[in-house]
Image (cartoon, coloured by chain):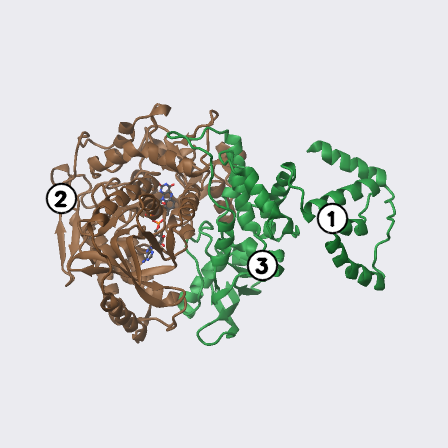
């Protein structure tokens, strides 16, 4: 019998930051993760992490305003204020834990400029910021002796009359299904990029946490807000960090024009991501692309500079396309990258479901609104990862005993898995996933309209039925059965896709990443609102549209 | 293009030695990676094939395996690089790891070695607010080690680990150097002494270069180990065979222009280390019988002078 005060689902930056905090507070903590902690997708973050540091002449209000403008005024401003105010200390603390940030002449941390921001306030480690941060938080978890259920896959939450009391999980190495009880559970299970094809996200970003929370009474908010990153590598879809443009790279179309002049004369290549992605897609759609791409040009930065500050990008470009960025521009295009939407939480990670908290990419606090600024996600993970630990620990103290009878819960999942394994269908998981994910990109893309969204919805509904009735899993074994794992992940992805298409169909305006070619304008009168979707046990959806919290920044027209 | 894969399979649920090689012929884009090919197999041909992979962009470190006998991250290895004419690609799990199923290995021993080197920053005191003020150069140097993604390739192909399980190994030692040279860490000497004295420490590396060759991130673990050796000697940690060996090697080459193997063996063991010296007797006798015993009084190399000059120059350049 496994039992803890606090169980954290996910060992990425949000999960580990939360765990370190809870461990310091003396709670009996454990983390459960389907991959080894350092394999979590946070390792892929390249460009950096934002923080307005006052001793650099910056102030939190500047960062907050850039974030809110970037969000197209959909972010809740009280939440943004907290993130901006806590950013400095959160980043400096990472340095003190051991992160090897790049520095300036004075020996203090140095910065680079990122999109949608007027000043350079992005702290970084070459082009491997996420990896550097994740490895250091992992080091801290070792220092504190954190217990980790490594390569365990959560199949459901233990829910007793609406109160969350732990999880049921599959130990991938043995194939055994076990219950792990806890006084509270924090979901920090990352994004859902695989709901789309292509995506910059790892194959493990399957939205598990979103689905787990949704199926236990939490709401999913602003799920239509899907970020398409302006620079993903041609053919492979691998991300080329915004750091490239932050360090001075240009974008060109097939006619040799720096086309951003037309779309964002002030910020040029460093406008917000939704703006740059739309500009590129427009160029491509109007025939000024090159095989469906435009060009990212770094040549003027020089080889030494590229290799020292953007080494990983050069590595990727050479290895995957055979292009030396110092000599040739690289073909890139917009690609699905991040979900702004997620499990609705308050600024302390509370979901409204007793015992259930959320933080990181799977949560929506909401600080990113309709478009996240580059380097604000890593910040989100550490600020709200820590805050959720603090709040959850208060709740933990009010719970007397977490040990409950769990056999019934395990039995239920065991039967579900048996059913999947015994199903004599004709569709492999990959076939259903690929069809759905391609349709999602078509329907809920950089540009969308009623028809495209209806199309995506139809495919999602079909996928749901195929998954239920005609799935086949070839591997019937227990030990590290990835075939079964992918099937369970597909179930999660279908839930995410369902919430995304309904969010998208609900919002009758264009805002940030949700750009409808059939309703092109932002409509503050009627739509300064979130879309918030609940699903009850019978599968019935309930959609609400709560107001956005505005504190000191009145919505104005958004120009870059 | 057509790709021919020969994959080593293992299913522990059938029986302990249920190992077989399975062929898959598939058709994919010529510039695909080996990972693309394996995913294609898994998605379209054989759902039972087990492998780990996640980011597909050589940063998560999940997909290490052997390709034609050498450890690689298959996500960054293109098919046409290895098999331009459609030759068979032999795919096996990483070496020096226990296999769980197919290409999936147990990574717990790898991470246990990492834990062995106290893998976190240990400053005597840290600033209460703000950051440590240290030079950018000192930090920049650490970026090489920081690039390590713990994929395990260096451990897979380490020739020492093959015979000596106590070796801390290339990845963990490279990680150790990341703390030894971090100006914010205050346990430098303790760390060096540990790495020097511990069984399986820095002197166990045989400099075979495999780790340098297979590292996908340019960490060059062996060079990090050599840095550590030098630093250990600098702080006066000299009570190791390794140090004596290096010392004797250098003395012999500078004096005679060639290696005096008899002396090297004796001096490495330590002139006063009677029991080690006795251990050497059978080796010496065997060599004598086979006519391979080096001469007791070494000849000098012909261009001894040149070699001496070289040695001097190397010392000066340091
Ligand atoms: C290529 C790329 C580059 C990026 N660059 C930047 C950048 O420069 N700056 C920035 O701010 N942001 C960046 N981002 C975004 C940022 O990296 C992520 O949003 C953030 O790291 C997410 O962290 P997380 O802790 O929420 O989730 P993750 O790091 O994804 O961790 C999720 C964890 O949950 C676990 N998990 C999931 N499901 C289950 C389950 N069912 N059972 C058990 N465990 C489970 C996983 O094992 C994992 O440990 C980038 C994203 C990508 C894809």
Give the quadrant of the C terminus of chain B. Answer: top right
**Contact between labelled residues 3 and 2, with CB atoms less than 8 Å apart:** no
Q: Nearer the viewer, residue A469 or A228?
A: A469
From the viewer's perspective, is A77 left or right of B150? left
The numbered mark at residue A387 is none
Separation of residues labelled 1 and 2 (CA atoms): 79 Å
Q: Which residue is mark 2?
A: A546
* Number of numbered discs visible in the structure rendering: 3
User: At x 42% / y 66%, what residue is drawn?
Assistant: B42
Chain letter of mark 3 equals: B
* Image position, residue B36 (x, y; %): 45, 59
Instruction: Give the chain coloured brown.
Output: A
Q: Which residue is mark 1?
A: B270
Instruction: Give the chain coloured green.
Output: B
Q: Nearer the viewer, mark 1 or mark 2?
A: 1
Query: Is disc 1 placed on a helix, strand or loop?
Result: loop
Query: Is disc 2 placed on a helix, strand or loop?
Result: loop
* Image position, residue B178 (x, y; %): 52, 41
Query: Is disc 3 placed on a helix, strand or loop?
Result: loop
The numbered mark at residue B165 is 3
Discs 2, 3: same chain = no
């Amino acid at each position: 019998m496994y039992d803890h005060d606090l169980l954290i689902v996910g060992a990425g930056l949000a999960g580990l930051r939360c765990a370190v905090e809870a461990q310091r507070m003396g709670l009996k903590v454990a983390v459960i993760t389907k991959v080894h902690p350092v394999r979590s997708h946070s390792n892929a973050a390249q460009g950096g992490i934002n923080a307005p540091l006052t001793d650099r002449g910056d102030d939190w209000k500047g960062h907050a305003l850039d974030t809110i403008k970037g969000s197209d005024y959909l972010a809740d401003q009280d939440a943004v204020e907290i993130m901006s105010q806590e950013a400095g200390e959160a980043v400096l603390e990472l340095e003190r834990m051991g992160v090897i940030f790049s520095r300036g002449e004075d020996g203090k941390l140095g910065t680079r400029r990122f999109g949608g921001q007027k000043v350079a306030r992005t702290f970084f480690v070459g082009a491997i910021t996420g990896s550097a941060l994740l490895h250091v938080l992992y080091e801290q978890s070792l220092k504190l002796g954190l217990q980790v259920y490594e390569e365990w896959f959560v199949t459901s939450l233990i829910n007793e009359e609406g109160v969350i009391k732990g999880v049921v999980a599959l130990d991938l190495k043995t194939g055994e299904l076990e219950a792990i009880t806890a006084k509270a559970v924090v979901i920090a299970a990352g994004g859902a990029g695989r709901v789309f094809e292509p995506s910059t996200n790892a194959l493990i970003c399957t939205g598990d946490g979103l689905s787990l929370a949704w199926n236990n009474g939490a709401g999913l908010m602003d799920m239509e807000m899907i970020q398409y990153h302006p620079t993903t590598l041609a053919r492979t879809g691998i991300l080329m960090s915004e750091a490239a443009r932050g360090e001075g790279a240009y974008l060109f179309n097939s006619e040799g024009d720096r086309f951003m002049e037309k779309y964002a004369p002030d910020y040029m290549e460093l406008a917000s991501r939704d703006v740059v992605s739309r500009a590129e897609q427009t160029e491509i759609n109007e025939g000024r692309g090159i095989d469906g791409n435009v060009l990212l040009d770094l040549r003027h930065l020089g080889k030494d500079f590229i290799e020292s500050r953007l080494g990983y990008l050069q590595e990727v470009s050479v290895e995957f396309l055979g292009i030396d960025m110092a000599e040739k521009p690289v073909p890139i295009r917009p690609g699905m990258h991040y979900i702004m939407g997620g499990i609705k939480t308050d600024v302390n990670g509370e979901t409204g479901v007793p015992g259930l908290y959320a933080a990181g990419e799977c949560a929506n606090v909401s600080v990113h609104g309709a478009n996240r600024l580059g380097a604000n996600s890593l910040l989100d993970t550490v600020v709200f990862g820590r805050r959720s630990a603090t709040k959850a620990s208060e709740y933990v103290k009010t719970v007397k005993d977490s040990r409950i009878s769990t056999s019934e819960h395990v039995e239920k999942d065991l039967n579900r898995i048996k059913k999947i394994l015994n199903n004599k269908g004709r569709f492999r998981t990959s076939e259903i996933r690929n069809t759905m994910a391609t349709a999602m990109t078509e329907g809920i893309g950089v540009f969308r309209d009623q028809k495209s969204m209806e199309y995506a919805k139809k495919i999602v509904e079909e996928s749901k039925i195929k998954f239920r009735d005609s799935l086949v899993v070839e591997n019937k074994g227990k030990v590290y059965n990835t075939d079964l794992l992918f099937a369970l992940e597909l179930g999660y992805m279908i839930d995410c896709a369902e919430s995304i298409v309904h969010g998208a169909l609900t919002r009758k305006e264009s805002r940030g990443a949700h750009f409808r070619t059939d309703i092109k304008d932002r409509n503050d009168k009627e739509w300064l609102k979130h879309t918030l979707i609940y699903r009850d046990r019978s599968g019935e959806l309930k959609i609400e549209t709560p107001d956005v919290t505005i504190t000191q920044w009145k919505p104005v027209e958004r120009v870059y | 293009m057509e790709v021919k894969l020969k994959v080593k399979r293992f299913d522990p649920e059938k029986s302990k030695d249920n190992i077989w090689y399975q062929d898959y012929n598939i058709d994919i884009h010529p510039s695909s990676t080996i990972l693309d090919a394996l995913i294609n197999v898994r998605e379209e041909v054989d759902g039972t094939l087990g492998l780990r992979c996640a980011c597909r962009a050589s940063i998560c470190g999940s997909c290490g395996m052997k390709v034609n006998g050498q450890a690689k991250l298959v996500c960054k290895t293109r098919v046409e690089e290895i098999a331009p004419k459609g030759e068979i690609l032999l795919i096996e799990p990483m070496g020096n790891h226990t296999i769980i199923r197919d290409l999936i290995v147990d990574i717990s021993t790898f991470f246990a070695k990492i834990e062995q080197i106290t893998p976190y920053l240990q400053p005597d005191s840290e600033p209460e607010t703000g950051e440590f003020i240290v030079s950018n150069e000192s930090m920049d140097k650490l970026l090489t080690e920081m690039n390590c993604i713990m994929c395990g390739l260096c451990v897979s192909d380490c020739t020492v680990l093959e015979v000596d399980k106590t070796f801390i190994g290339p990845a963990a030692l490279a990680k150790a150097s990341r703390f030894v040279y971090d100006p914010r860490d205050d346990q430098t000497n303790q760390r060096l002494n540990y790495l020097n004295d511990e069984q399986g420490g820095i002197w166990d590396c045989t400099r075979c270069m495999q780790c340098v060759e297979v590292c996908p991130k340019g960490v060059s673990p062996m060079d990090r180990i050599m840095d550590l050796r030098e630093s250990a000697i600098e702080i006066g940690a000299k009570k190791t065979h390794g140090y004596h060996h290096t010392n004797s090697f250098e003395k012999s080459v500078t004096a005679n222009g060639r290696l005096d193997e008899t002396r090297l063996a004796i001096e490495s063991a330590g002139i006063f280390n009677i029991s080690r010296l006795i251990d050497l007797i059978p080796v010496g006798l065997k060599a004598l019988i086979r006519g391979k015993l080096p001469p007791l009084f070494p000849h000098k190399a012909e261009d001894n002078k040149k070699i001496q000059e070289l040695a001097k120059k190397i010392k000066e350049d340091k």
